[in-house]
Amino acid sequence: MTSTTPSRETRFERAVRLCTMLARGDVAPIAQGLWLRWHGLEHPFGLFVAAEAGHHHEHSGGMRLSAVLGTLAIPRGSVVIDFGVGTGIAALTLSRHFTRVIGIELAPDLLAAARRNADRMRVRNIDLHCADVREVTGILDSVTHIYMFNPFGEAIMRDVMANLVASVDRAPRALTLVYKAPEWCAPIEAAGFVLKRSWRFPGGDAYAVYERPTPRG
């Protein structure tokens, strides 16, 4: 797939974004940004990756994701896959809630940054893979949870859901999906997932949690 030339947020755009967040009292992203800078983590904002394969990259880890995960009953030994792991900031948050985190990323530069970030934080339960999400199959059989920050369009979402359904056919189990900025929900529901809860935080950050029960028989 053809990748476009990455473009980064300008200083003016960053200043406008920060002023807007302060004006509406939306301080969680600012606190997260300060935490990232304190630890020296790589977190480009608004980095566009591939027109055909995905959306622009923004990290989605931090307090809000942790708050959503805190409402779930996550059994010990649970494994989560992060489709579109980017620079791994969400994976760092996920690593505190799951025994194992599998990160899938198409862009090698972003994946390399994710590895450096995990090393800086000395996190050892994150496995990172450079791959097209549509080609990820066998590794899904150990997954109990899925995390996505609207990483791709509807057509790819259908393919990913088909792979998850095939995985459940091979290894019957329940699945839980956490979807930030939920946009392509129809393929998820067509794959047997049921919306259980949704959130909208100040500033417009939205999350949805879907569950797919263990198949009968």
Image (cartoon, rainbow, N blue to C red):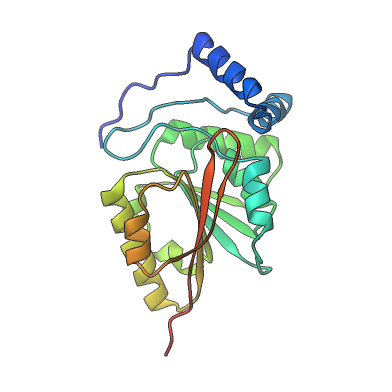
| 171 or 30, nearer to the observer | 30
Residue under the point 50% across and 73% down? 174
Placement of 115 over or under 191, stated as above or below: above
Return the x and y of residue 98 as percentages of the image width and height. Answer: 65, 58
Q: Is residue 74 above or below residue 151?
A: below
- Where is residue 55, by image quadrant? top left
Answer left or right for 70 relative to 176: right
Q: Quadrant of the C terminus?
A: bottom left
Which sits in the foreground, 135 or 205?
205
Compared with residue 192, is residue 125 higher up or lower down, i.e. above or below? Answer: above
Residue sitting at the far front: 24
Residue at x-position 68% and y-position 34%: 120
Q: Quadrant of the N terminus?
A: top left
In the image, taking residue 200 as reference, residue 83 lies left or right, namely: left
Q: In this view of the protein, can residue 139 be seen by the observer?
A: yes
Q: Residue furthest top?
A: 12
**Position of residue 197 measured from the top left corner of the image (x, y, whole percent):** 55, 59
Q: Left or right: 131 with respect to 127?
A: left
In the picture, residue 30 is in which quadrant? top right
In percent of the image, x 68 and y 41: which residue is there?
63
Q: Residue furthest bottom?
A: 217
